[in-house]
Image (cartoon, rainbow, N blue to C red):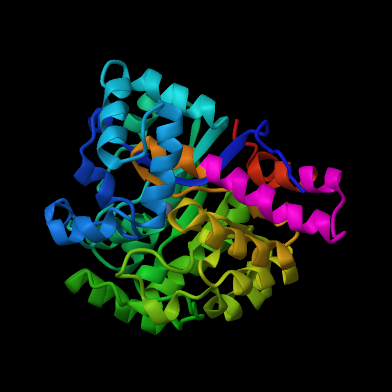
Amino acid sequence: MKLDFSSYPVIDHHSHPWSKDTKEITKELYISIMNMGGLSSKEARDPENVAHAEFTPMGRQILHLLAKFLGCSSDLTSVIEARNKSSRGDYRRYCEELFKDANIEGLFVDDGYSEVSVASSLAKREFEDFENISPVPIRRVARIEPRFQSAVDDSKDFEDFVSRFDDSIEYAVRNQKAIAFKSIIAYRSGLHIDKPEEEAVRRDYAISKATRIRDVKHIRDWYARRVISKCPELGTAFHAHCGFGDVDVVFDKCNPSQLYDLLKDQETWKTKIFLIHGGYPFSQEAAFFANALKNVYVDLSEMIPFASIPGAMEKTLQILDLAPPARVVFGSDGIVIPEVHWAGAKIGRQVLENTLAKFVETGVYDEDESHTAAKMILAENARRIYKPW
Ligand SMILES: [Zn+2]
């Protein structure tokens, strides 16, 4: 059974900006982003790290696709040389060609960066700068944690903090065209989001003001719930990073199963909540919520293209095993260079073709239904839910 979804456009539900300084790239830069969390530029020059990182499934599968696109052999040196030859003249045009090749309609872009550590791999990049270089329309997904930290840093007391935080959330929608909020609480105090008492939240405010530490659970649980409760009136969705990511994720509290108390609480049911990265590798837990709760959705980013293609097929099968296709969206977690977004779209279609073929072979869907499901996942769900353009 061979399905072909190559003509269906893609909306990338979760991605990050690249910068115009990537007009030309080095082998070290390429290697440094081909694993989860990336390597620092110093680590990427260490020959031992290079020897290991050069052969990640992600690195190889993108090189093979690029070799085909650029018409060169698939070794790292040839691909980087051919890429720079094509991109150094008119970078925007090169990006346009890439995006046309992968039929990418638009990107939802997480404007976040690390608010607690400058050493983090995600540098601050202005969304507005990216708007000028992106070859397709983009929409902002506003990261909550930097807005929380600024409200703490700039406030004179707790009441002032609450009003600054609320203002920053409303400002993101009214003045910065945010279509969703994203929390990386899985990197701060973990996904088990409670209902904290006010006294505990005030205590955490004082600790955060004095230390800016990551682990102030009560006030983080408070801001997550506060934003979720505001989403319906603001017309936005809520995105939660779930599952693996950089090594500083709170490893024992990043499984989406930790969201059970929050998600079963009816106070959250009016908000569309997206489990980002399909909860990778905890795909079945994410899929359960998207099956059981009609406001919960799963996003396929990061595992496509950061995991291998066969691995992503297995996880996508687990997701579609339970989650209705109307509650699954494609995403790439594309980062640093546009080739990750491009490869994500191409690999995403390939993964869906192979996964949905199994559904057709076994009589779950007929062929038409598999095409309907693919179109929904690749772009139609995002278009219907967000009406982004
Ligand atoms: Zn991301």
Q: Taking the image as drawn, is residue 295 in sight?
A: no
Residue 289, horizontal then vertical, whole percent: 67, 71
Chain part drawn in magenta:
345-371
Pick the front one: 262 or 382: 382
At 51% from the left and 66% from the top, the residue drawn is 280
**Residue 270 higher or lower than 262, as above or below:** above
**109 part of magenta stretch:** no
In the rendered structure, the answer to whether residue 368 lies left or right of residue 132 reads right
In the rendered structure, the answer to whether residue 310 lies left or right of residue 59 reads right
Most extreme residue toward the top, as rendered?
A: 89
Pick the front one: 269 or 339: 339
Which picture quadrant has residue 238? bottom right
Residue 92, horizontal then vertical, whole percent: 36, 21
At 28% from the left and 53% from the top, the residue drawn is 54
In the rendered structure, the answer to whether residue 40 lies left or right of residue 33 reads left
At 30% from the left and 81% from the top, the residue drawn is 203
Which picture quadrant has residue 165? bottom left
Pick the front one: 67 or 336: 67
Q: Quadrant of the C terminus?
A: top right
**Residue 358 higher or lower than 62, as above or below:** below
Specify the principal SS of the magenta part. helix
Residue 292, horizontal then vertical, whole percent: 74, 71
Most extreme residue toward the front, as rendered?
A: 73
Q: Taking the image as drawn, is residue 315 in sight?
A: yes
In the rendered structure, the answer to whether residue 364 lies left or right of residue 254 reads right
Which picture quadrant has residue 117? bottom left
**355 part of magenta stretch:** yes
Pick the front one: 98 or 309: 309
**Residue 260 higher or lower than 331, as above or below:** below
